[in-house]
Image: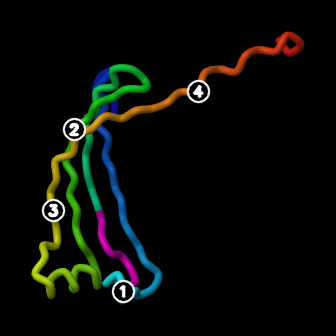
């Protein structure tokens, strides 16, 4: 969501799904966890943009049950900060016979 020409608010959503049980990793089939967040970035240039944001992580399904048995928390809120770098390709040189 464009707030100004430089300030951008970006929502994020992630989910991890597994197709089978894996006892070695203590992972069950189905939805294991999800992350929902918001990041506010200042796009100083197209290739450089520092950001700050919040991330809400939550365990789900059989992974949540295992965490409860182990006394772990099911959800966490995190403050995130970083720099978004984008490497832009330069335009290819024009060939004399095609221009």
- Whether residue 5 is in magenta: the answer is no
At mark 1, the secondary structure is helix
What residue do we see at 73% from left, 16% from top?
93
Residue 26 falls left or right of residue 18: left
- The local crowd at label 4, few if under 14, some if 14 to 19, many if 20 or more residues have their Cα within 10 Å, is few
The Cα–Cα distance between marks 3 and 1, rounded to whole angstroms, is 24 Å
Residue 3 falls left or right of residue 68: right
Q: Nearer the viewer, residue 6 or 69?
A: 69
Residue 45 location, x and y as percent?
Answer: 39, 20
What residue do we see at 34% from left, 56% from top?
13
- Closer to the camera: disc 3 or disc 1? 1
What residue do we see at 15% from left, 87% from top?
69
At mark 3, the secondary structure is strand
Q: Earlier in the sequence, mark 3 or mark 4?
A: 3
- Closer to the camera: disc 3 or disc 4? 4
The Cα–Cα distance between marks 3 and 4, rounded to whole angstroms, is 38 Å
- The local crowd at label 1, few if under 14, some if 14 to 19, many if 20 or more residues have their Cα within 10 Å, is few
What residue do we see at 31% from left, 46% from top?
11
- What residue would you read off at disc 3? 76
- What residue would you read off at disc 1? 24
- What residue would you read off at disc 4? 89
- Closer to the camera: disc 4 or disc 1? 1
The Cα–Cα distance between marks 2 and 1, rounded to whole angstroms, is 36 Å
Q: Earlier in the sequence, mark 2 or mark 3?
A: 2
Q: Is residue 24 above or below residue 32?
A: below
Residue closest to the far front: 24
Q: Earlier in the sequence, mark 4 or mark 2?
A: 2
Residue 52, numbered circle = 2
Region in magenta = 29-34
Residue closest to the far right: 97
Residue 60 location, x and y as percent?
Answer: 26, 76
């Amino acid at each position: 969501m464009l707030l100004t020409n430089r300030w951008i608010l970006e929502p994020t959503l992630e989910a991890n799904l597994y197709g089978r049980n894996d006892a070695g990793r203590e992972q069950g089939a189905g939805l294991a966890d999800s992350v929902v967040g918001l990041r506010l970035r200042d796009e100083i240039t197209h290739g450089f943009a520092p950001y700050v944001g919040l991330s809400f992580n939550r365990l789900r399904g059989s992974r949540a049950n295992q965490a409860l048995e182990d006394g772990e928390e099911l959800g966490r809120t995190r403050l995130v900060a970083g720099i978004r770098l984008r490497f832009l390709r330069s335009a290819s040189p024009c060939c004399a016979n095609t221009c």
